[in-house]
Image (cartoon, helix red, strand yellow):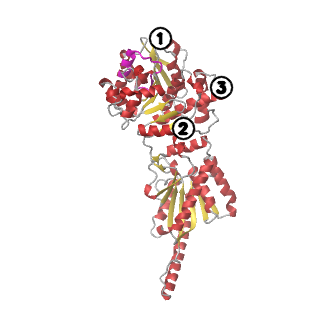
Amino acid sequence: MGLNNTTVDLDNNIINQLKNFEQKFKIIQKEYITPDEMNIIDNNCEYYGLSKHILMENAGIQVYNEIINWEKQDKNTSYDEIYLFCGKGNNGGDGFVLARHLSKLYKVNVVILNNENEIKTSESKANFEFIKNIYKFGNINIQNIQNISNNQKALFQEITYKLDNLIKTHNTNHNNIKNSNTNNNNNNNNNTNNKKILFVDALLGTGISGNLKYPYDLCVEYINSIKNNVNYNKNVDIISIDAETKGLTADKIIAFHKYKKSLNNPKKTVLKEIGIPKYMNYLIGKGELKALSKIEEESHKGNNGRTLVIGGSKDYYGAPIFSALAASKVVDIMTVATVSPVVPAVKNYPELMIKEFGGDYFNKHHVEELAHISKNYDSIVLGCGMGLKSETREFLQKYLNKILSNTDSENFPTLIIDADAIKLLNPKDFESYDSNNFNNANGTNNIHNVIDNSNKELLLKLFTNEKVILTPHKGEFEYIKPILEDLSEIYKLNIVLKGKTDIVFNKNNIKLNMTGNAGMTVGGTGDILAGLIAGFATKNEPYLSACSGIFVNGLAGDYLYDKIGYNYNSKDIIKILPKILYKYII
């Protein structure tokens, strides 16, 4: 797939494979998603061709329809006026769309809490400009109460004055009808009509983090003071778009696509579709990259990540270098821990620090020192070019046991296990692997048959650690699959299964990566992937880092394919990474 070719082509084989994965590894798709996850989906929709303008229009229409239906359900209620309180993000943009549609039937007051030039996104700006240009011809009034507390006070005094008049008018009409019915011996009171004011909360939606700041806090305070007033509460309804603004209690929430964790009360939330296909939940795109932690201007050396690559052997020089060079495009400090024969090759790259260990291969004598220095890093890549010698297998098991014994999970580095290290996890001979050998009498997999007692505890620690990422290709995955199936109820680690269509999954998530092409079968691309994931993982969650790494790696390959076809190698990918990162992350 080329860099600019973002057509989604999910054939039935891929869909079936996803379903099979979900069943076999007991992946539980979450009913609720976080605001950050929703932002990822929104950005990925845009990447694959479904514009945010369309999503915003659909959101506004859905809220409009819900308001109309809500009013129809209570035939004794009608809205005399509607106030939309709009913030500067896309939640406010939804409010601008809603105002345009509501103005066909109601008098609409659009209240903005920021200067016009502070509206954040192009789609929100476009919808604001539209209502601004047409408000003279319709039922739209725009009021800006940003940073002027007197303006806010005046606005809400105006609202309470209108409410007083509504209540007075309603009571007068009600008494007149009551007297008329008494005189006519008619008990039909259906002609009474309770006029209300509707507040629409389009302030922050899912974009809220932390405590409210001025002027949002004051606005919420005023809204609450009216809603909680016993004289007015029966004449005021509040609807929140996508999520309640903090401190505000809505009568109804209209959420989009999926419920938002901690922000939607199911008892008063109506879930509406806005045109996002279900398969967008499964696709990796630019949304993951937009969600990555950004470099802060005031940061200093080390603040933006420290990665350690442990790999290399007498037989394989290039693998740890490729991995380290990829990570160096993302992190501040990059160290290669390797054995003596590899050191001269690493010295050709001054951006890489070196920690040398004697001998041709890693062995048990290196464990203590490596475990000690590992504490100084945010992420570790383990396995690139390490080889499959028995002494290396012994080293790997002792090293993993040592670092996995660290009970301080918060400071435990994200661990990316790649290539030879995946094969060395199991003391059984991986070359003679046969999936039939791992089945018990009932035809189900059992960890007791897969590994011997000496390795059982290690694999249990490894597979239940959410900061572990395995990056197998199809053959390596077949080797670890029986273990994963046996631990399907309790595993927590992350898997990046490399293939024509990459699959990234853990216990609660599964996604597909559509980037990459056949040119990436050259040696070193898997090492680059491990390095990218490790670099992102220094400041981000493991699953997000895994998705971002596989996506960027494939994008680099697609860029090169668009320029020169399949005639590129891993060095070319390394060179192009800064350009890809700049385009999608900055």
- Label 3 SS: loop
Residue 282 in picture, x, y percent from top left: 51, 40
Three-letter code for the amino acid on which mark 2 is drawn: Ile
Q: Earlier in the sequence, mark 1 or mark 2?
A: 2
Relative depth, front residue between 349 and 341:
341
Judged left or right of residue 25, residue 62 is right
- Label 1 SS: helix
- Mark 3 to mark 2: distance in Å? 24 Å
Using the image, tell me which numbered label, if any, was put on residue 565: 3
The answer, for residue 62, to whether it is visible in the render is: yes
Q: Which residue is mark 1?
A: 341
Q: Give yes or no for residue 402 being in the magenta stretch.
A: no
In the rendered image, the residue lying farthest to the bottom is 183
- Foreground mark, 3 or 2? 3
Relative depth, front residue between 163 and 463:
463
**In the picture, which quadrant includes the N terminus?**
top right
Counting other residues with Cα less than 10 Å from the Cα at mark 2, is it few (<14), some (14-19), or many (20 or more)? many
Residue 569 in picture, x, y percent from top left: 59, 21
Counting other residues with Cα less than 10 Å from the Cα at mark 1, is it few (<14), some (14-19), or many (20 or more)? many
